[in-house]
Image (cartoon, rainbow, N blue to C red):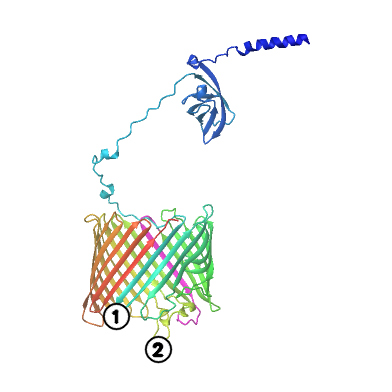
Amino acid sequence: MKRALLGLIAVLALAPSVSAAPKQKKPDKASEKGKQVRLKILVVDVADGRAYITPGAKEGLRVGDQIDFGKLKYGVVAVADSSAVLVMDDQHPLAVGDKGRITVELGREEKKVERLQAPPPLSTFKGSWTEAKKPSLDQHPKPVPLGLIEDNRRNRAAISLSGYGVSGGGESFGRAELRAQLHYEPFVSAPFAMDVDVSGQTWFMGDRRASDARPAVRVRQLELSYGQQRSWFGALGRLRYASSFLGQLDGVRVRAPIAGGLSLTAFGGAVPEPLSGVPSSTARFGGELGWEELDWAWRPRVIVGGHASRFDGKIDERRLNASIDLMPQFGHFGTFAEVSFFDADNPWGASTTELSAAGIDADGRAGVVELSAWGRMQQPERSNWLAAFLPPEFLCIAGTSATSPSPCLGSGAVYTGGGEAGLRFDKASVSVGGNASVTQNTTSTMAGGYANTRLIDLVGTMRIDAGVAVSRGTFLNTVAGTLSPGVELLDRRLDLSARYRPALVRYRADESAFLEHLVGAAVWVAPSRSFDLSLDADKAFGSDVDVFVVQGLATWRPEI
């Protein structure tokens, strides 16, 4: 016990001397300046093409240092006290946990970044350069065909307000229409689409009686579809076109590709009433076979189709259609035909098999020369369905008979044809042409000719259109001239034009002639890419006419 107490006293006696021992000095960094140190680098994170490593600036890393990762080297692009950043190679990315090495020199100074002098303000250069002349002012490209006008945006909309008014002879009438159109594709990955074209309209007719031909609401299209051009396609609803030869249909249309440019289309549904446009119980169904090769030089397209309809419980329309189109770069050639089939006791005196329509047209360009010609034959469109809505004179040419109604003479075909030749230069064009028509089983005939010229960019964007026309018809002979100057302003966003048309007119039943005048003006303005407005007004006056006509259209195309 005595020995233990003496040991404790000895320890306590030495404690002050131990605690008072001097601390060991840390190495002075200034003394280590210039010393080479080998650092171990560790990748701790990887993101967006960058690798984040430790250590950092405290251990001697600096921007621009090259770190060895095996046979690869990566440069330091940013440094913090305890970490740094590398930009990786896409072909040889780093991973978390990769290790590298680098030898650095301690005590290196960071590279100083010198700030650039502030640039002089723009006002310093005011008046230094004259305004450059727009290259387009000296460019006058020749017009070339651009093909079909298409809007390939996935979603598009248009809202338009149109109307017209006519005043003359002591009475006035007019019409206004608010129309909305929409094409909407809700999915990027699937070709679903919705097409809507609907309008509300009203008439200002004074004391004239309204009728089914003037509906307050008109639905041109209300369609859901799936598919794309030259592939599988299906549409359901109010279709704008049932086929290449038919208009509206409340039903379904399906197209299937067969091989190459060959496709088969089938359709069926109810036909809207021809006057009011409301759905009806009349059914129409058919199909068509199409072939086109738009990648060929002449871009051929051939379509053969047929359809039938059912009205009042019986088969009504029976028709076959065919069309051929060739569309080379220098022009177009097309022809079509329609064959209709009727019952032997049909009320129009038509043959059981009848060529009800046919036509041909062609146009071409060679240098500055442009040529075109066309000819058509068209029988009145006849069916029991139409006969329920229209008076008999709309469907056939009636003969003279004491009975009422007079029997149809059978064919009431209208034959029309014409041609045009012209020259088109950079700033001028001139064309001459003629047309004629005759109606079978009547004395109705018409023949005429015309010559027109246009001069553009006369002074700035000023232009002048002038022409003369001569026509001889069953009831009226006319010789007329036209003069119409115009100008484009505001970088071609505003178009102003005026026109004057004097005409010497003579009724075939009267030997005397009289002079008529027409004075008019037109304005088109597009204050933005999404909105444009046009107004057009004409005043015609003379011993036989005194009428004022005004019409306008405003269209807004919002981005959706």
Q: Where does residue 533 sit, x and y in percent of width and height?
A: 34, 62
Q: Residues within 10 Å of mark 2 (few under 14, many from 20)?
A: few
Front residue of 155/271: it is 155
Give the number of marks: 2
Which range is magenta? 327-349
Asked which secondary structure carries label 1, the reply is loop
Query: Which residue, given by chain and number where applicable, does mark 1 sit on?
Result: 170
Tell me the residue at 53%/24% (across/down).
Answer: 68
Would you say 405 lies left or right of 491 here? right
Would you say 508 lies left or right of 55 here? left
Disc on res. 126: none
Q: Look at label 2 and name its amino acid.
A: Ser
Query: Which residue, given by chain and number where applicable, does mark 2 sit on?
Result: 401
Q: Where does residue 248 sit, x and y in percent of width and height?
A: 47, 69
Quadrant position of residue 252: bottom right
Front residue of 93/455: it is 93
Mark 1 or mark 2, whichever is nearer to me = 1
